Amino acid sequence: MDATDIAYVQRLLNTPWERHGFHCWRLVEQLQRDLFHREVPFGPVACPGRIKRTELLSQKAEDYGWCEVDRPEHGAVARMHYLGGNPHDLEHAGVYLALDRGYVIHTDQPHGTVLDTVRELGARGWIPRWFVPQN
């Protein structure tokens, strides 16, 4: 990431979460478009239903040119579910940024837009799965 990208990410930090506005999937779409110059075919605009988005990313990602990987890489979409819960019950998403120790930028109701390490996500109870575009 260059200085312009870092400044862009810093401007997003602390942006409040909004259920019908700036929520996690909107953040993912925005970051993928603005930083990585690609569209996410399974985001809220293309697919407004939470259950349908989860299905597309979890079960049909390859149909849309994305694949699941074991380890995060810069720009990977983090599709998260809550520890101990059914992966389809509580959905959350963010984007992995390979800065320093590696962070996931995401937004949720109690925290707004934040950067968390993978370890910090785990401490909050989130289990991520990583998705990247197929080459």
Image (spheres, helix red, strand yellow):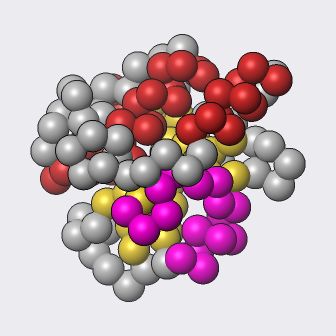
- Residue 77 located left or right of residue 23: right
- Compared with 76, 93 (above or below) is below
- Compared with 37, 71 (above or below) is below
Give, as a single range, the part of the protein colored magenta: 109-124
Say whether residue 61 is visible: no
Quadrant where the N terminus is found in the figure: top right
- Residue 47 located left or right of residue 118: left
Question: Residue 19 at what x, y percent from top left?
Answer: 24, 51
> What residue lies at 42% left-to-right and 68% top-to-bottom?
110
- Residue 24 located left or right of residue 49: right
> What residue lies at 37% left-to-right and 62% top-to-bottom?
109
Image quadrant of residue 62?
A: top left
Q: Nearer the viewer, residue 11 or 2?
A: 11
- Residue 36 located left or right of residue 10: left
Image quadrant of residue 26?
A: top left
Say whether residue 89 is visible: yes
Whether 119 is among the magenta residues is yes
Whether 92 is among the magenta residues is no
Q: Nearer the viewer, residue 84 or 116?
A: 116
